[in-house]
Amino acid sequence: MTRDPVEAANTRPLTINDIAAMTGLSKSTVSRALNSRPGVSTAARTRIDDALSQSGFVPARSARALSTGRTGLIALLVGENRDPNVLTFISGAVGVADQSDLHVVVGVSASERNNYDVYQQLLASRVVDGAILVWPPSGDQEVISKFVEQRFPLVAIEPQKPFPGVPAVYADARHDGLIVTEHLVDRGHRRIAIALNTPGWGEQDRLLEGYRAGHRRAGITVDSALIRRDGWSFEAGGAAVASWARMKNPPTALMFNSDFAAIGAVSAIPDEWPAGAQRPAVVGYDDTEILGWMNPPITAPLDRRATLARAAAEILVDILASRPVSDVTRLRTSLIVRGSSAMNVDVP
């Protein structure tokens, strides 16, 4: 006796053969529908949708995708897998997605060389409806341009270089550099060092512009020896501290454009700083949660990374809803002052 296709499917995972038997459609038609490809009539999609709903094995979100062409999933693609900011980005994006009945899928690359594979697995397969790219390097230009040509919805957070056709979200780095410098000047600091990423990355030169502007406003001449470009890592922060500590007239305050480097610096500062008994003030940049648990807690622009993720997710939601968006968005934030820079310094 022939078993009911629905009953047969309910005893094991559903397959394309099961759906074809349940609907009377060909396997190729079912496959095209499941992968949101063209060439499937509305009536056929409706039959497949109904069969999936009756089976009880397929979530309503997947069933809806067959008739709407949408999965209800967006991707957050991160090119750096050891950065604690990833959790901050996820939190910011998820908060916005939930309000729009979307879910976030996270893709993390082991290195820039693996970015292509992640793009293919999540984007080319249309598993997701759109994607937020976190710190995408300029080397991704070729593969990203292909998705732009296909009008696949993308938003980039602080890309190394702008990608034509991809809206980008940045912090207002010049403003950040200015408010941090003014904060330190107000605390009495006159020798303020700044550590940046290696040349060619994103908006860091705008951060330096703000740093210089803060000095000009205070009538302080910038010492170029206090500006370093070692990178964003723990090791880079330690290297910067070691270099500054060897100076005859070392800085009394240290600015970083990476929380990683700021944390590495705090760990590397010697017990007796050459400028006197007082340890130098330290200011981070990303406001990763761990900054508040350091000893001392580290000052930084408030909630910077989560703010970027929320803004990027809102832009992606607008794109999916066919609403107009800006090519470039820059966000301003305030400074949260913690123990690492709260004290005034006495300058001879």
Image (cartoon, rainbow, N blue to C red):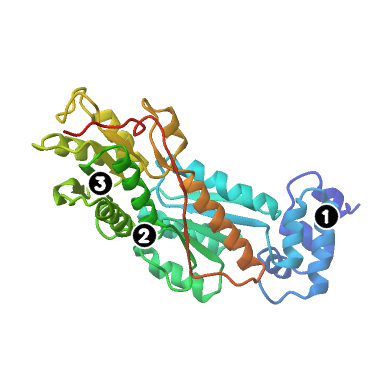
Write down the residue under mark 2: 137
Label disc, if present, on residue 194 of the rendered structure = 3
Which numbered disc, 3 or 1, marks the residue closer to the eye?
3
Between discs 2 and 3, the one toward the N terminus? 2
- Crowd rating for badge 2 (residues with CA inside 10 Å; few <14, some 14–19, many 20+): some
The residue shown at (56%, 44%) is 91
C-alpha span from label 2 to label 1: 42 Å
Q: Are marks 2 and 1 in contact (CB under 8 Å)?
A: no
Label disc, if present, on residue 19 of the rendered structure = none
* Vertical comparison of 299 with 8: above or below: above
Q: Secondary structure at mark 2?
A: loop
Write down the residue under mark 1: 53
The residue shown at (72%, 59%) is 16
Q: Secondary structure at mark 1?
A: helix
Percent across and percent down for residue 282 are 31, 36
Q: Is residue 103 in view from this perspective?
A: no
Q: Amino acid at mark 3?
A: Ile
C-alpha span from label 3 to label 1: 59 Å
Q: Give the residue furthest to the right.
A: 1
Percent across and percent down for residue 84 are 43, 39
Left or right of 137 on screen, residue 87: right
Q: Nearer the viewer, residue 344 or 41?
A: 344
Q: Nearer the viewer, residue 270 or 128?
A: 270
Left or right of 197 on screen, residue 336: right
Q: Nearer the viewer, residue 284 or 146?
A: 284
Classify the position of the C terminus by image quarter.
top left
Residue 38 occupies which quadrant of the picture? bottom right
